[in-house]
Amino acid sequence: MIHSGSLQINSKQHLKIGGCDTVDLAAEYGTPLYVMDEGLIRENCRRYRQALQLCYPHGRVLYAGKAFLTLAMADLVKEAGLGLDVVSGGELYLALKAGFPAKDICFHGNNKSGVELQEALRAGVGRIVVDSLVELQELCALVQSQQQKTAVLLRFKPGIEAHTHDYIQTGQDDSKFGLGFAEILQAVRIALHAAPFLELKGFHCHIGSQIFQLESFALAARSMLRLMSAVKKETGFLACELDMGGGLGIRYLQVDNPPSIEDFVQTVARAVKEAATEEGYPLPDLLLEPGRSIVGEAGLTLYRVGVIKDLPGIRRYVAVDGGMMDNIRPALYQARYAAVLANKAAREATQKVTVAGKACESGDLLIEHINLPPVEKDDLLAVLSTGAYCYALASNYNCHPRPAVVFVRNGKSRLVVRRETYADLIALHQS
Ligand SMILES: *Cc1c(COP(=O)(O)O)cnc(C)c1O
């Protein structure tokens, strides 16, 4: 039932994370509470860097901040020696406030505003990943009028759409992200024309998220090298960088069996090397942008159990003091989670229940049909693997203050985001 190495059970039968007793954490910081195992995040960063270093020395790992980003997280990423992906002016602002070096920041987005592009230029971000011809033209005008240089990648749709357990190869790709082949050729010509202010480094793709099948990454790598080779034939442009995006899946349920970070990196690196050899293309620098697989399994959410409703012959609802406002993923795309009764972690899971949130939506069910030990009011429930895309997607629906975020490591905890107050909820209102 406990599927992560960072979780343990102590002699009081309490669940521990990062050496901290979750019952104590809930008492100290309140619930709902996001708890992140800082040691595991650091370990994942290290594994990515080391794996890439081993099989592709001219490589770089960037953490995709949209999965989970706070000042403390930006600090950690900087210390771990990774670069950082941002997707908005707001994420860029946060990163700069954290003192993240602008040259190690990569700016993404399918609809960057003119203001955001200016902010990125002013900050001097390391890369801007151009997603459309309109954006490219706007960027060209900006760098020329400001006489300021910037380095760019062009985002390509490789026609491979990957999901958790499968992928589809599509000829003409229906996606709001990226450029098709004809547009890429046009973009390359525009970008080369705008040199030296625009420095075209190469190409980017990102084929999806929560992907288990490594073959889809290998296919994408081959597709990118074919693109690069074709672009070279048509325009003479030789790319020195290839950014393969993120997307490696994580374990949410006991039955999930995602590939390791090492296997993922190795597969991508090998596919790039093989395809480059096949195409006779010089090896580009390789960039990877993992988000979920850095933070996902490192997080859990602690909830206090409230009302329990037995509907005989139907089901037992166990309501907790959070829900879709702190974890929208089950309601948004039927994401499934495992959970542990954190104050009775060693007890046998003998009762099937549905964990309900407290938002005014019938669809606000965090977990349908999970086996737990007999649950009582005021028990502490830990929903596992909530480190990615939960805090980042949290809302104030029903005027619920967003939970605090705590980092734990070696038996010590520290508050990295304080819990919102009722006053925070109306801080921006005018009457
Ligand atoms: C979301 C995103 C990532 C990270 O994806 P994960 O599935 O969290 O690893 C990387 N690159 C880009 C461009 C993205 O949009």
Image (spheres, helix red, strand yellow):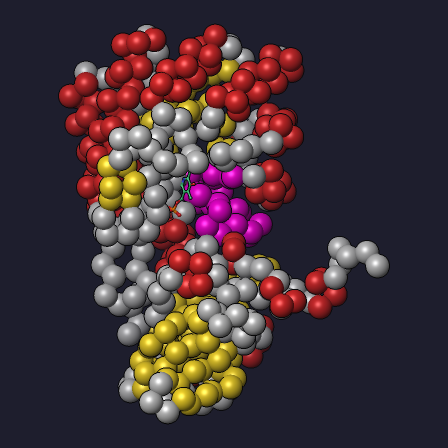
The magenta stretch spans residue 26: no
Q: Position of residue 32 (x, y in %)?
A: 54, 72
Please indicate, yes or no, whether residue 300 appears anywhere in the rendered image: yes
Quadrant of the rendered structure where residue 222 is? top left
Q: Is residue 69 magenta?
A: yes
Q: Indicate the position of residue 57 as horizontal and vertical percent values.
A: 29, 31
Residue at 43% of width from left, 55% of height from top? 388
Q: Residue at x 33, y 89 (%)?
A: 313
Residue at 81 percent across and 56 percent down: it is 430
Q: Residue furthest right?
A: 431
Q: Quadrant of the N terminus?
A: bottom left
Q: Nearer the viewer, residue 333 or 280?
A: 333
Q: Quadrant of ligand 1?
A: top left
Residue 303 in view, yes or no? no
Q: Which residues are magenta?
A: 62-87
* x and y percentages locating residue 179 in the rendered image: 40, 26
Apparent side of residue 264 relative to residue 121 in the rendered image (left or right): left
Count every numbered label the image shows and give the total. 0
343 horizontally vs 59: left or right: right
298 is higher (above) or lower (below) than 123: below
In this view, the residue in front, 216 or 99, is: 216
Q: Quadrant of residue 208?
A: top left
Q: Is residue 25 above or below residue 307?
A: above
- Please report the residue visible at 62 percent of the width from the left and 68 percent of the height from the top: 398
Quarter that holds the C terminus: bottom right
Q: Position of residue 163 (x, y in %)?
A: 29, 48
